[in-house]
Amino acid sequence: MTHKILIIEDNPVEMQLACKMFEKIKEYEIFQAKDAFFARECLKMHKIEIVLCDIGLPGESGLDLTKFIIGAYENIIVIILSASDDLHTSEKAIENGAFSYLVKPVKSSQLRISIANALKIREYQKLIRDQQTSLEEKIKYLELTKSELEKSEEEFRSIFENIQEGFYRSSLDGKIIMANPVALKIMGYTSFEEVKGFETTDFYKHPEDRDKLLEKIDKYGAVLAYEVEIVRKDGDTATILVSSHKRKDHSGKVLGLEGTIVDITDRKLLEAELAQAQKLESIGQLAAGIAHEINTPIQYIGDNLNFVKDAFEDLNELVKNFTGFLETAKKERPDKLLIEDMESNLEDADFEFLAQEVPVAILQSLEGVEHVRKIVKSMKEFAHPGGGEKVMVDIHKAIENTVTVAKNEWKYVADLILDFDDSLPMVSCNPGEINQVLLNMIINASHAIADVLDDRPEGKGKIIIGTKNKKNKIEISIRDTGAGIRKEARNKIFDPFFTTKKVGKGTGQGLAISYSIIVDKHKGKIFFHTEPGKGTIFTIILPKKN
């Protein structure tokens, strides 16, 4: 089935970017309008299902147009795309009937999920509304017979039990009053009688998630794809996506909540495996460089040891000669010829040179051993998985270890400068995941500089890694002097599998995984500022406590 989407956007560049999100998806047919006038004409001519509308349109605003569309076309879904994150504007959009309000730049995956969930919820609402309308009309005007009522209820039950997503209803006090077989299976139960009277919080691993969910529903009227962890009947943990909205009667009175749940536990495991695979890929990419870093000190340690070995043989021979000379001297006074022979042996051994150079060779070897030890120690600390739990981590130490591990990536193209805030405290985080983010950032910065070195006669670029201690959070910045990020790529930079690198040089997973680690797993922020020809600054914000 093809869904018809109307994109209303007066900016040609934004229109092109929006259209590109759907160009490879056969299920969507795209229509375009640059203002409200063309939008109204398109709505008359085509059976549009979804409208993606910008607020700042010439003439009639996106908010007023939304209100018109919702009033004139009952089954059309309107999703607002706006560069403004103003709370009042978003509330006004929802009040005017918009299904959701997404702040630009909107990720392709985010928009597709929003559309898919909107279509599903509309389908369920339409099915339920059609059934309710049918029942009400028959009761009111046809005085339904018992058999007709049973038939209608059977049709509703068939829809309820056979939809592919879990469906539930709860009362105002949070008690579950309805759950279809899919929802029961997700929770680990086989019959509704087992969960009857339970509250939704009884299943949440973290009960505060229900308060957060209710807060969002009160604010926006509905919630799409809210991720929570639940505990099944057998005690196992599962991750689900909840889409929920207020359930009202014909007078508008709120009766409770209803919505759908989808089990994404397997998907989360796959994401974790993908993140680990990407980390192993990065480690593999660094392996040759680390081997090179270790090989250099090992090589001069070997050269020095060979020199010390040869020096020892010369000295050993000299000692043997002196031992013989000493034995002769004990018995009789050495003659001139024997003394000259010993002087010749001393000269041949070049004792003065050996006395000067052997200690230097030993000192250099010890320095080489220390250099290798530091590299191996940094690699061990970087690669240590650290478990799944968050612990208190020294961010400066994590940065230094990652810089050492990635040295072969950056040392030929950039000078790396550390600008640390000495007041930075220990931070609660997963060390392995944070190391992975830092590694991705340093490698990306190195590649960005390497791409422009041929065009810069001044030689190497610079990578500056800084930290700042703020009130309830810390800030990490990674600045490079590369070419910057192209304008057309900026809205996609955190999308999975999107890369600006040449074929074979990047999978497009590094920044997507970094975004997931910082935003989803550590409740932080990651963003960037870029200037063409000057470089890019990636900024990571982490709360001090998680």
Image: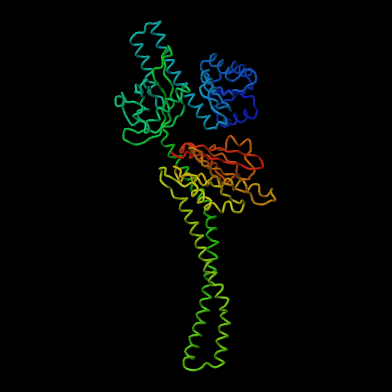
Would residue 493 be found to the left or right of residue 167 on screen?
right
Front-most of residues 93 and 76: 93
Q: Residue farthest to the left?
A: 193
Number of marks drawn = 0
Task: Identify the residue at horizontal 52%, vertical 32% (top origin).
Answer: 109
Which quarter of the rendering shows the C terminus? top left
In which quadrant of the rendered view does residue 252 lie? top left
Q: Is residue 226 above or below residue 63?
A: below
Task: Identify the residue at horizontal 31%, vertical 35% (top origin).
Answer: 234
Can you give x and y, in whole percent of width and height, for residue 429 in the image? 45, 42
Front-most of residues 420 and 384: 420
Front-most of residues 50 and 94: 94
Can you give x and y, in whole percent of width and height, for residue 325 in the image? 50, 88
Task: Identify the residue at horizontal 55%, vertical 89% (top origin).
Answer: 339
Would residue 439 be found to the left or right of residue 186 on screen?
right
Q: Is residue 426 above or below residue 206?
A: below
Front-most of residues 124 and 545: 545
Can you give x and y, in whole percent of width and height, for residue 266 in the image? 42, 37
Can you give x and y, in whole percent of width and height, for residue 147 in the image? 34, 11
Would residue 416 be found to the left or right of residue 245 on screen?
right
Q: Residue farthest to the front?
A: 423
